[in-house]
Image: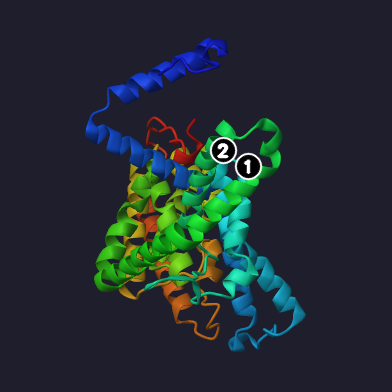
Amino acid sequence: MIAEIGTEFAGEDETAQVVAATTRQQNLTPWGHVKEAFNQLIGVITGAMSPIVGILAAGGILKGVLAMLTMPQLGALLSAKSEAYIVLSAMGDSVFYFLPMLVGFTAAKKLKGDPVLTAVIGGVLVHPSLVALNGKSLLEIGSLNFPMVNYTYSIFPMILAAWLVAKLTKWVKGWLPGYLQIIFTPLIVIAVVSAITLYITGPAIIWLSNGLAFGIQFLLLKSGWLSGLLIGGFYQVLVIFGLHWGILPIIANDVAATGHSYLNAILSTTMIAQGAAVLAVAIKTRKTALKELSFAGAISAFCGVTEPAIYGVNLKFRRVFIAGLLGSAAGGFVSGLFHGNMFGFAGSWIGFASFLDPKHPADLSNLWIFIASSAVATIVPFIVTLVWGYNDQMTAGEAMAKPQKPGTAK
């Protein structure tokens, strides 16, 4: 029904949007409804995750740098028991420890719920007294046992909790007198949603999330070089269509469940490869504007953001983009072959510290895999672009518009 209270006061644009959306929903087939629901789910997940990717990357880099500072090979410049280490470690860990609160806040904004109220639910999940109960029984009913789960580093339980908060808040305000809402709405919502999450949805989602993470880890380890070759070769194709945002929650879940991600190690090479391809253009071209744009794109890609390189240069000269794909396939092959692993979110050359295991700082084997795969991902596309991918006689094709993030769609 369109004729809800207040719609008669809406502007023409808003009314037209509501009518169009309702008509589209009514014309959907059963399969269309499934696709629509899936797209909305991806939109909520990416809308919750994309605002905090930067701070996740920053936290991961800081943790990697701390691992370097405690390496015996460097003379253990910092003791793990020193005050400086403890403070810096808290800075690096805070974003991961309180991730449920951050995800709850951003997910609530996407769902048009109450961000602060939802963040409080996240605070309940990571309260020190409950974290200390990890693995212990919270409740026993007959033969049923409800153990406490550790929700630090978790993502998906809070996204569902944010949806429950939005729905329950709306329902409570529908019948609770206005003069009681300011106190009793948050009281009811916090009590109900916290209980549901702690005893029902949270443990179930954590179990499924861990299964997904370990399943992906198993497949990548078993397929090795093949998965590295295929994922490395095609990931940046997903980027040009905006489909890579669906991979982000998988990577985040990997790190949350296992503390590392083989998948992210492969994806890191794809950023480097596109940056190396556009760097070759910057060096080869004599066109001042293109040279400046290409250098900027290369720096951005080596810092983990490939969109300026891809949309600014590489896709306009198709061979440059293809050279980048060849390089990332080669780099992914090396990473997959030697089981390169990553312990944070920051990829590309700037993310080197994320390839150090914070628990075993003396083990440099994974860092050497990163250097080898990244070197291949740099050299191959750079040479291919110089020899075949670009010359100043080429005519730039039409630019492709950068697709909108699913989480920012209105």
Q: Say whether residue 95 is visible.
A: yes
Foreground of the two, 35 or 335: 35
Q: Position of residue 57 (x, y in %)?
A: 56, 60
Q: Nearer the viewer, residue 281 or 4?
A: 4
Q: Amino acid at mark 1?
A: Thr
Q: Reading the chain from its start, which is encountered first: label 1 or label 2?
A: 2
In front of the other: 125 or 342:
125
Element class at badge 1: helix
The label number, if any, that marks residue 172 in the structure image: 2
> Which mark, by number, is residue 185?
1
Between 283 and 317, the one lying in front of the other is 317
Give the percent coordinates (x, y) of residue 394. 37, 36
The reply to whether residue 299 is in sight is no
Q: Are marks 1 and 2 in contact (CB under 8 Å)?
A: yes
Relative to 131, residue 350 above or below: above
The correct choice, above or below, for 94 with respect to 43 in the image is: below
Q: Secondary structure at mark 2?
A: helix
Residue 388 badge: none
State whether residue 226 is above or below residue 310.
below
